[in-house]
Amino acid sequence: MKKRILILPLLTLIACGQNAENVKAQINSDQEKIQQDSTAFSEIESSNIKSTPEKNPNLNFEQLYPYLKNSLIETVCEACRIEEENSKLLAYSIESNMFLSSWEWDLNNNPLLIKDVDNDGLIDYTIELFNAGGGCGGQIGESERWTLFGSKPNRFEWTHIIPYRSETGNWETR
């Protein structure tokens, strides 16, 4: 939208000159890019999977990942573009391309927990992630636990920071 506002006065000034066709082509190109960005963002917001937790209580990570990704992106403090790797999700600012956050999981050492953790009779899915950046490019690195509760099957909730054992042998929270 900002690009359109900035380009329209320029178009008005140049439209009568010999560069009018070039300017129109550039505007069309910019509008296509904006539309592609909007489409990509709406795909992130509305990524649906065919099998929801309430219909199939034994989902695997691949089926749950769209929910996890959407929930993680919601914690980012500004509009972002994402990069996905095998076991990692990275977020960068759209505006400045600055690093905002990364979430990494290791399903071999910390497998997805499929269990009724809140005793409501519904299956819950819990995953442990390592979060670097905190969603706003901060200088943090912490292990977090995220759970998709059977009673709220459309999103993962950040439940808590996982304590770690310090060099002294004591359990620490940060």
Image: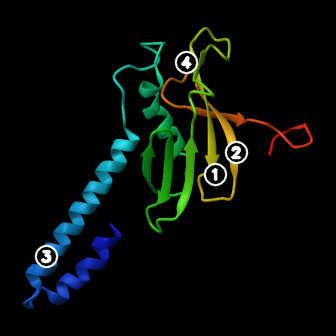
Q: Quadrant of residue 163?
A: top right
Inspect this view and state whether residue 75 appears: no
Residue that carries the numbered disc 4 in the rendered image: 150
Instruction: Tell me, for residue 24, which label it has, or none.
Output: 3
Q: Who is closer to the viewer here, 166 or 3?
A: 166
> Residue 73, image x and y in percent?
50, 46
In front: label 2 or label 4: 2
Is residue 166 toward the left or the right of residue 111 in the image? right
Q: Residue at x 69, y 53 (%)?
A: 140
Q: Quadrant of the N terminus?
A: bottom left
Q: Are the residues at dot 3 and dot 4 in contact (C-beta closer than 8 Å)?
A: no
Confirm or deny contact between disc 4 and disc 1 (CB under 8 A). Answer: no
Q: Earlier in the sequence, mark 4 or mark 1?
A: 1
Q: What residue did someone put label 1 on?
A: 134
Q: Secondary structure at mark 3?
A: helix
Tell me the kind of residue under disc 1. Answer: Gly
**Dots 2 and 4: beta carbons under 8 Å?**
no
Are there few (<14), some (14-19), or many (20+) residues within 10 Å of tag 2? some
The residue carrying pointer 3 sits among few (fewer than 14), some (14 to 19) or many (20 or more) residues within 10 Å by Cα, namely some
Q: How far apart are the two marked residues, 3 and 2, measured between alpha carbons? A: 49 Å
The residue identified by callout 2 is: 142
